[in-house]
Amino acid sequence: MPEKNGTVLSHEQYIVQIYHKAHALTGEPGHRRTKHQGAKDRPNRRRVGEYKVTSNEDIGEILSVRLYKEYYLVTDEWFCKYVDVTSPSGHTYHFPCYQWLSGPRILEIPEGRGKLLLGTVNPVIQQQRRTELDDKRNTHRWRFYSEGVPFCIHVDNIKDLLLNDQYSSTKITSFLATSATTVIATKLKGYDSSTASWRNLNEMERVFYFITTKNSERVSQVWKGDTFFGYQFLNGVNPIQIQQCSSIPDNFPVTDHMVAGSLGTSTNFQTELQKGNVFLADYKILQGLPINTINGQKQYLAAPLCLLWRSPQDYIIPIAIQLGQTPGKDSPIFLPSDPEWDWTLAKMWVRNADFQYHEAVSHLLYTHLFAEVFSIATTRQLPMGHPVYKLIIPHFRYTLAINTLARQTLINPGGTFDQITTIGQKGLDVLLRRAMEELTYDSLCHPEDIKNRGVESIPNYFYRDDGMKIWLAIERLVSDVVHYYYKDDDSISKDPELQAWVGEIFTKGFLDNQSSGIPSSLENKPDLIKYLTMVIFSCSAKHAAVNSGQFDFCSWMPNCPSSMRKPPPTIKGTATLDSILQILPQVNTTTRTMTVVWVLSNEPQDRRPLGNYPDEHFTEEAPKKYIQEFQTKLSELSSQIKERNKSKNLTYLYLDPERIENSVSI
């Protein structure tokens, strides 16, 4: 309730409206049925409750309100959306909350206007923010995860998270239902327990005949084609691996003669290199990783180099593949002119390497783990009244829940990752550490990443184009908000809460790696705008790009093998379809992989698409207007993407704003 000098005032009436809702009627997480249905003056569920607070004098500007529960409500859990206080003069103060009240907790909510701790600040505000952050630092503690890997939230089980961080019951029910449907189906068919090899490709097609997508069906038809192989480097689930190649690496001795058949007679290899039409996908980071054992059988991994070329028809096609980093007679360079199954198998090894890198680095590290770091640091260092908190908090919804669940069941020892991938959990830890050592700030910023990889002019690169439009839309929103609250560069460099926030991210997330170019402090408006755009883009658009197409591209196992059961070939002329079936994952490994990518590709219910902010943390008209403009721009982009895809056999909808979730929540 409103206070003055620490004393509750009584007499002149103030009208207090509290929007609250309880578990039983709302499907929110952590439901406990109340034991006090008949308690006097009990707030009504799922509605605005109106209360009168009196004072014998004008108490002046109201800076915060305190919510707490009477003793008979302590075991209940209540969700407060907001509190509005109307003074006798008719002025209304807004207090956005959007938090659960659990146990005997006292929750103090600041007035809704964004405020910075700069200049002369009311001591009440200073104390409220200190108390809030002290409390959050106790509930959100860092935990060491693995050497050289970002820190994570200090909980063992998803149930140990605060209610504010858990999945809603709607979302968890939807998530479990999707998982159960696929698991039960494969168990009933006997696939989940079979360690046999696939007898033919037709048998593989029957596994998930009841769960398909338009794109997954198309992939199963075109997976062997060179143009489709190249297309996946642009618009598949790992669209950040390809880079321009101006000179061939010394350990990849491709000659003019080798690629002449692919290039034709109208050009030559050196000319194409000089024109910027040659590209490289290099998986050297995988070399020497620990290798997994699945079903008692050792798995194998290649660290290939794959050379690609932009054809006159504007296709990106592979023209040479070497399956190891060390050239020699035991590491032949495979070419499109080789026997059909030799060339197909070489491409499969590249796709297997790409699967390991994608799941560990592009997907897990760049989106899930960094989003968790951003989320924890925001909770610990930015109070609810800080404008940056208000801007970015929607983009961390459910991130702690999905990451905690992943550590419980997916990337834990013996978990799903151990059951389906070549590198397993032990190899994953090493790969994450290597990726952290190579990480750069530019690789996290879409415009710089595109430029540094030299892929600005590749045609039909929808990830690049859609991603750039979304980046610019986010950047516009961020810029408007930053300029509204920060009057000059000095106000940024002297904002203690902002600097503590970015400093903690640098230490706990990027592990003080100064060579990465990632800032440990922010000195001016452009720095802050770029950094916040990176954070929001990583948690929303980038995650959608590397997550949402997993079933489309990876459910057809020959296109994206999660593991390989025999070593890479050292000579040509030995591959057949039968021998490849003995290399591909066994039946149960295949079906488990299909189940995982189906679940991860389907966002459960209780979604909030990019730009959809039903929790109104901003109360001023200006930032509300900026959000509306952002939503309008996203709507325009969505229409453009839908129109483009009408003419595509293989659609690219992963960066349609309507399909991008605000946060990493699956």
Image (spheres, rainbow, N blue to C red):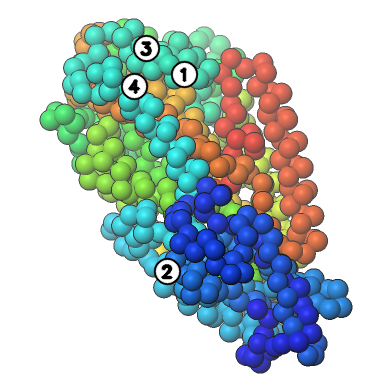
- The local crowd at label 2, few if under 14, some if 14 to 19, many if 20 or more residues have their Cα within 10 Å, is some
Quadrant assignment, res 420: top left
Q: Tell me the CA gap for discs 2 and 3.
A: 48 Å
Nearer mark to the viewer, of 2 and 3: 2
Mark earlier in primary sequence (4, 3): 4
Q: Amino acid at mark 1?
A: Thr
Circle on res. 534: none
367 and 177: which is toward the camera:
177
- The local crowd at label 4, few if under 14, some if 14 to 19, many if 20 or more residues have their Cα within 10 Å, is some
Viewed as shown, does residue 396 lie left or right of 51? left
- Which residue is tagged 3? 205
Circle on res. 139: 2
**Residue at left offset 52%, top offset 66%:** 101
Looking at the image, is 359 positioned above or below residue 534? above
- Mark 4 near mark 3, Cβ–Cβ under 8 Å? no
Q: Secondary structure at mark 4?
A: helix
- Which residue is tagged 1? 212
Q: Amino acid at mark 2?
A: Thr
Q: Tell me the CA gap for discs 4 and 3.
A: 14 Å
Looking at the image, is 128 positioned above or below residue 229? below
**Residue at left offset 44%, top offset 56%:** 32
Nearer mark to the viewer, of 4 and 3: 4
Total numbered labels: 4
- Which residue is tagged 4? 185
Identify the image quadrant of the N terminus. Answer: bottom right
Q: Position of residue 270 (x, y in %)?
A: 49, 24
Q: Tell me the CA gap for discs 1 and 2.
A: 42 Å
Viewed as shown, does residue 364 lie left or right of 156? right
Q: Secondary structure at mark 1?
A: loop
- The local crowd at label 3, few if under 14, some if 14 to 19, many if 20 or more residues have their Cα within 10 Å, is some
Q: Amino acid at mark 3?
A: Glu
Mark earlier in primary sequence (4, 2): 2
